[in-house]
Image (spheres, rainbow, N blue to C red):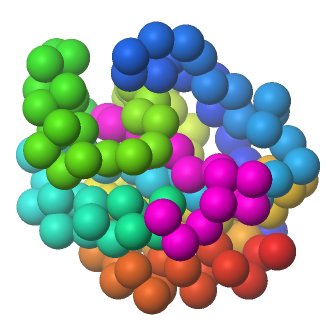
């Protein structure tokens, strides 16, 4: 694995998130777009993963990319009942993290080293397993 790129973004609803400030705990970083059908289909899996894995055990953040305005992002979060922090991403974050398709997610260990990267729909069991083996 290699070190994850920097990730410092505003959080929908206020505040900021810094991956560096999260060091010491495994993290799942989930990149999505509000218009993406596969993202919509896998949102429930992300919500269930949050229920299965305690925040002290695994940080989960969703980074929205390719969005038009905050209302679009809020509607998506409400409709799919996302229960994780949603970070407001941009094209430079997409480039740094090599996100070329949606959804893309990374599993990082407590040193922010990339352990897994997946693109496209992932089952809840797949997300759970990939995030489980970094502990």
- Which span of residues is magenta-colored? 51-65
The x, y position of residue 30, in whole percent, is: 45, 53
In this view of the protein, can residue 120 be seen by the observer? Answer: no
Q: Which residue lies at the image location 71% right of the left edge and 35% below the top edge?
A: 19
The mark total stands at 0
- The relative height of residue 11 versus residue 60 in the rendered view (above or below) is above
Quadrant hosting residue 90: top left
Magenta-span inclusion, residue 15: no
Q: Image quadrant for the N terminus?
A: bottom right
Q: Which sits in the foreground, 118 or 131? A: 131
The x, y position of residue 56, in whole percent, is: 75, 53
Compared across the picture, whether 11 is left or right of 44 comes to right
Magenta-span inclusion, residue 58: yes
Quadrant hosting residue 114: bottom right
- The relative height of residue 68 versus residue 35 in the rendered view (above or below) is above
Q: Which residue lies at the image location 80% right of the left edge and 30% below the top edge?
A: 21
The x, y position of residue 86, in whole percent, is: 41, 34
Q: Which residue lies at the image location 54% right of the left edge and 21% below the top edge?
A: 9
Compared across the picture, whether 32 is left or right of 15 comes to left
Compared across the picture, whether 57 is left or right of 49 comes to right
- The relative height of residue 100 versus residue 18 in the rendered view (above or below) is below
The x, y position of residue 57, in whole percent, is: 74, 61
Q: Image quadrant for the C terminus?
A: bottom right
- The relative height of residue 66 versus residue 68 in the rendered view (above or below) is below
Q: Which residue lies at the image location 35% right of the left edge and 83% below the top edge?
A: 123
In this view of the protein, can residue 118 be seen by the observer? Answer: yes
């Amino acid at each position: 694995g290699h070190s994850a790129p920097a990730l410092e973004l505003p959080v929908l609803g206020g505040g900021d998130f810094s991956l560096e400030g999260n060091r010491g705990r495994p993290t799942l970083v989930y990149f999505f777009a509000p218009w993406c059908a596969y993202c919509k289909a896998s949102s429930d899996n992300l919500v269930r993963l949050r229920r299965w894995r305690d925040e002290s055990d695994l940080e989960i953040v969703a980074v929205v990319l390719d969005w038009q305005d905050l209302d679009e992002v809020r509607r998506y979060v409400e409709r799919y009942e996302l229960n994780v922090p949603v970070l407001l991403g941009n094209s430079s974050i997409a480039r740094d993290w090599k996100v070329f398709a949606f959804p893309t997610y990374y599993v990082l260990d407590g040193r922010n080293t990339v352990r897994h990267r997946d693109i496209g729909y992932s089952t809840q069991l797949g997300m759970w397993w990939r995030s489980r083996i970094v502990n």
